[in-house]
């Protein structure tokens, strides 16, 4: 609503004196979803998607989980945006109104190779993932929401949205040791605040590294732990 008033004042020049909701305190955005994809769910989804009649769904699933791209970014891709030689995808316009170049893993590259070489693509279609022609004869991006929902229902997978695959992809980047700047460059997060929700993943990964640090030499004996009783209590 605040944005609407601001646009009306600055761009539409409707004669409003001020934005009446500009000083209203906004609620915090919350922590966001943290749904992770289990290994069992991923195996089941891949097997069922592979059996689907349209191979585009499988390519889209792989690309989403390997790159962290949004579903709208993937669906709207054109052939000119995919550089298989350099293994990157160039997004001219994203949700954050900024361009970015997404590097591709080998698995994502393989999916794009197959998608680009799709023998069912009409010669005049420049979309990587295309649907049937509309009433105007133009082909729109491939729509897979209903198929995705039906497959989840069939497999009994609950509370999993396609956008959660983006969260899974970013989580894996963090767990692999990528820095916040590197993750942001790949995922397109403009604010480091958005990436703080993944900090716990990096902290948990550091625990095993801390255990590998050389132990400092001390003259004090290592305390014994036995059911909560100290060695002094035993002697007593």
Image: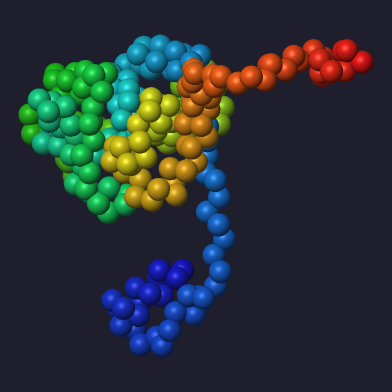
Determine the residue located farthest toward the right in the rendered image: 236
The quadrant in which the C terminus is found is top right
Res. 69 visible in picture? yes
* Residue sitting at x 55%, y 57%: 28
Is 100 rendered above or below residue 88? below
Residue 79: % across, % down = 13, 33
* Residue sitting at x 49%, y 27%: 206
Q: In the figure, is residue 228 to the left or right of 216?
A: right
Q: In the figure, is residue 39 to the left or right of 221?
A: left
**Nearer to us in this view, 70 or 158:** 70
Is 123 rendered above or below residue 5? above
Query: In which quadrant of the rendered view does residue 164 lie?
Result: top left
Residue 199: % across, % down = 48, 37
Residue 147: % across, % down = 40, 26
* Residue sitting at x 47%, y 43%: 196
* Residue sitting at x 35%, y 45%: 189
Is 31 rendered above or below residue 157? below
**Nearer to us in this view, 131 or 101:** 101
Determine the residue located farthest toward the left in the rendered image: 123
């Amino acid at each position: 609503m605040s944005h609407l008033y601001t646009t009306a004042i600055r761009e539409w020049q409707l004669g409003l004196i001020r934005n009446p909701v500009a000083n209203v305190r906004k609620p915090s955005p919350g922590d966001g979803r943290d749904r992770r994809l289990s290994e069992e769910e991923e195996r089941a989804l891949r097997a069922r998607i592979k059996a689907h009649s349209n191979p585009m769904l499988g390519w889209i699933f792989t690309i989403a989980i390997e790159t962290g791209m949004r579903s709208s970014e993937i669906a709207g891709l054109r052939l000119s945006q995919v550089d298989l030689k350099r293994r990157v995808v160039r997004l001219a316009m994203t949700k954050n109104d900024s361009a970015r170049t997404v590097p591709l893993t080998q698995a994502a590259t393989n999916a794009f190779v197959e998608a680009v070489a799709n023998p069912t693509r009409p010669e005049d279609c420049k979309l990587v993932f295309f649907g049937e022609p509309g009433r105007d004869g133009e082909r729109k991006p491939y729509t897979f929401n209903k198929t995705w929902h039906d497959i989840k229902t069939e497999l009994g997978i609950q509370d999993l949205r396609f956008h959660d695959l983006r969260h899974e992809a970013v989580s894996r980047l963090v767990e692999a040791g990528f820095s916040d700047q590197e993750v942001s460059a790949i995922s397109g997060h403009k604010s480091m605040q958005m990436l703080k929700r993944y900090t716990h993943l990096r902290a948990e990964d550091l625990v095993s590294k801390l255990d590998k640090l050389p132990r400092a030499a001390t003259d004090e004996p290592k305390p014994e732990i036995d059911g909560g009783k100290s060695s002094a209590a035993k002697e007593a």
